[in-house]
Image (tube, grey):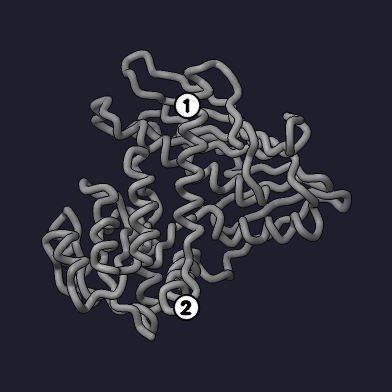
């Protein structure tokens, strides 16, 4: 069955992830309409796929020839297309790089539940070939995770005006990292401790970190610990500095070894036998993998609901890390 889809927002990942995936899965997806805040970009994408350009997301979601809405990039209207899709009974693919606004997250979760639509979040980190291989190694060779280290550097945008946008981007990165660590460990943390650094010339955070404690019961420090951080402290023009000695996207110390993950497709791990280097470039691209899952969730009789719950849970944990910093104490998450 082909899904007739409308694209809402194209963004930076369009050329290297979404466009190739839609072309490769032409037997499963048919692009009918495109809406983007940059009119010329929408026209080019629509012409390539034989689709029509649409002026607004509400007009797109209301079309009778649309089965699902692919939200592929952040736009000025935020998460409003989700509510429009709920009203129209259209499935939603919530692309990477977008953020559920904290003040609207609960409303969106409730509306999606009430509408009964299929809703899938593009969790790139957890669905990458390297992460899936890491989960296999944890189950077979490395054993349970004990310590996780996850850091990401973002450039300061050129012509930054100290608006809320840089902070919002850091928050979104933290949400994705929290979800990633929850997925790798396989359960929810019980405590969080947060720390925030504010730049001298701005009231916005330029670095945030948190510790997630996955210990059971009332014994903190006895289970897995995840150290998560994200910073925006290099000007965008400092390309060499930004890329100098980059850390592994995720480092995991397990009961029987250590693994270093570089997204999307490299895992280097060590055990008693020594060093093992695995490159998974031959695996299906993550964009195709995710869209295939979305197609299955829309066309099957089993409704997918966990993605939105996971996104809301990760966002709530990040908010509790902010609370931990403001109150100067560790915060329980149970």
Q: Residue furthest front?
A: 114
Image quarter in which the C terminus is found: top right
Question: Vertically, is 156 above or below 123?
Answer: above
Q: Nearer the viewer, residue 135 or 315?
A: 315
CA–CA distance in space, label 2 to label 1: 39 Å
Label 2 vs 1, first from the N-terminus: 2
Which residue is tagged 1? 322
- Looking at the image, residue 329 sits to the left or right of residue 87; the answer is right
Image quarter in which the N terminus is found: bottom left
Q: Nearer the viewer, residue 257 or 190?
A: 190
Image disc number at residue 301: 2
- Looking at the image, residue 250 sits to the left or right of residue 32; the answer is right
**Residue positioned 33% across, 56% down in the render:** 111
- Looking at the image, residue 191 sits to the left or right of residue 8; the answer is right
Q: Residues within 10 Å of mark 1 (few under 14, many from 20)?
A: many
Question: Vertically, is 156 above or below 279?
Answer: above
Residue 213 visible in the current orientation: yes
**Residue positioned 60% across, 42% down in the render:** 248
Q: Nearer the viewer, residue 175 or 157?
A: 175
Residue 131: x, y in percent?
A: 61, 56
Residue 221: x, y in percent?
A: 74, 30
- Looking at the image, residue 33 sits to the left or right of residue 311; the answer is left
Residue 201: x, y in percent?
A: 32, 15
Question: Vertically, is 17 above or below 146?
Answer: below
Residue 243 visible in the current orientation: no
For label 2, the SS is loop
Q: Nearer the viewer, mark 2 or mark 1?
A: 2
Image disc number at residue 202: none
**Residue positioned 55% across, 38% down in the render:** 246
**Residue positioned 32% across, 53% down in the render:** 12
């Amino acid at each position: 069955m082909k899904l007739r889809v409308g694209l809402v927002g194209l963004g930076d990942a369009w050329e290297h992830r979404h466009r190739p995936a839609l072309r490769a899965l032409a037997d499963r997806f048919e692009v009918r309409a495109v809406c983007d805040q940059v009119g010329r970009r929408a026209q080019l994408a629509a012409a390539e796929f034989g689709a029509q350009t649409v002026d607004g997301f509400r007009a797109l979601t209301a079309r009778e020839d649309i089965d699902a809405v692919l939200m592929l990039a952040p736009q000025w209207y935020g998460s409003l297309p989700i509510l429009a899709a709920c009203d129209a009974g259209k499935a939603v693919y919530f692309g990477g790089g977008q953020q559920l606004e904290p003040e609207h997250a609960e409303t969106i979760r409730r509306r999606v539940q009430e509408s009964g639509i299929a809703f899938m979040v593009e969790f790139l980190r957890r669905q990458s070939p390297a992460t899936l291989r890491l989960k296999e190694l944890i189950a077979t060779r490395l054993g349970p995770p004990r310590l996780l280290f996850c850091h990401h550097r973002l450039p300061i945008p050129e012509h930054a005006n100290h608006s809320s946008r840089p902070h919002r981007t850091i928050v979104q990165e933290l949400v994705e990292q929290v979800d990633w660590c929850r997925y790798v460990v396989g359960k929810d943390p019980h405590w969080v401790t947060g720390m925030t650094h504010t730049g001298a010339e701005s009231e916005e955070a330029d670095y945030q970190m948190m510790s997630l404690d996955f210990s059971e019961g009332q014994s903190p420090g006895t289970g897995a610990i995840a150290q998560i951080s994200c910073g925006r402290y290099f000007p965008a023009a400092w390309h060499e500095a930004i890329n100098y000695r980059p850390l592994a996207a995720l480092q995991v110390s397990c009961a029987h070894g250590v693994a270093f993950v570089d997204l999307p497709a490299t895992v280097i791990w060590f055990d008693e036998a020594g060093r093992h280097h695995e490159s998974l470039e031959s695996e299906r691209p993550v964009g195709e993998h995710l869209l295939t899952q979305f197609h299955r969730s829309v066309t099957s009789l089993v409704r997918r609901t966990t993605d939105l719950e996971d996104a809301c849970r990760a966002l709530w944990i990040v908010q509790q890390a902010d609370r931990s910093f403001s109150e100067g104490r560790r915060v329980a998450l149970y």
